[in-house]
Amino acid sequence: MNDIRDLMTTEPLICTPLTSIDNIIKIMEDNNANEIMVVDTILEKHLVGKIYGNDISAKSVDQSVSPSALNAEQVMKPVGVTMRETATEKECLRLMDLNQIDSLAIVDDEGHLCGIYNRQIQ
């Protein structure tokens, strides 16, 4: 049985609630990514939200503002489900199937972000 710690990305893209959307867009572009995790502080890494690339444009249209006028806190969505770092791959896949998601935030017992597990497309 595969331990999720051996399979997850251990250094996911992160930002804080006050990170500007311009910086988030740059991070996402530089890493060819479509999501970034929002943590309380870079040091503590308590997971507080998640931003997808399309969240940025949708929020700026909804509020009729330029994305550069927004920060992560204004755009982020809550993370619906997480899994503990002690889980198995099978447990993660089951939770992902139940929630119809392709990536899962992995946290420790205190809620610190440890990594991201992405479903492997076969």
Image: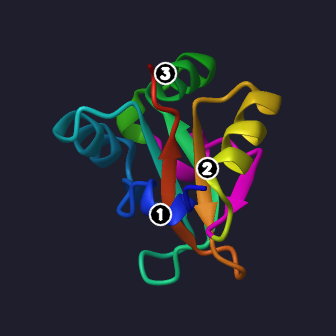
The one of 81 and 39 positioned closer to us in this rendering: 81
Which quarter of the figure is the N terminus placed in? bottom right
The residue to which callout 3 is attached is 54
- CA gap, disc 2 to disc 3? 28 Å
- Residue 6 figure quarter: bottom left
The one of 21 and 103 positioned closer to us in this rendering: 103
Number of residues whose C-alpha sits closer than 10 Å to that of mark 1, classed few (under 14), some (14–19) or many (20 or more): many
SS at mark 1 in the image = loop
Give the label on residue 16, or none: 1
Residue closest to the far right: 98
Residue closest to the far front: 1
Task: Point out the frontmost of discs 2 and 3.
Answer: 2
The residue to which callout 2 is attached is 89
Task: Indicate the amino acid at tag 2.
Answer: Glu
Q: Residue at x 52, y 74 (%)?
A: 45
Q: What residue span does the magenta drawing correspond to?
A: 70-85
Q: Residue at x 61, y 49 (%)?
A: 89
Residue 74 in magenta stretch:
yes
- Residue 15 figure quarter: bottom left
- Say whether residue 77 is left or right of residue 102: right
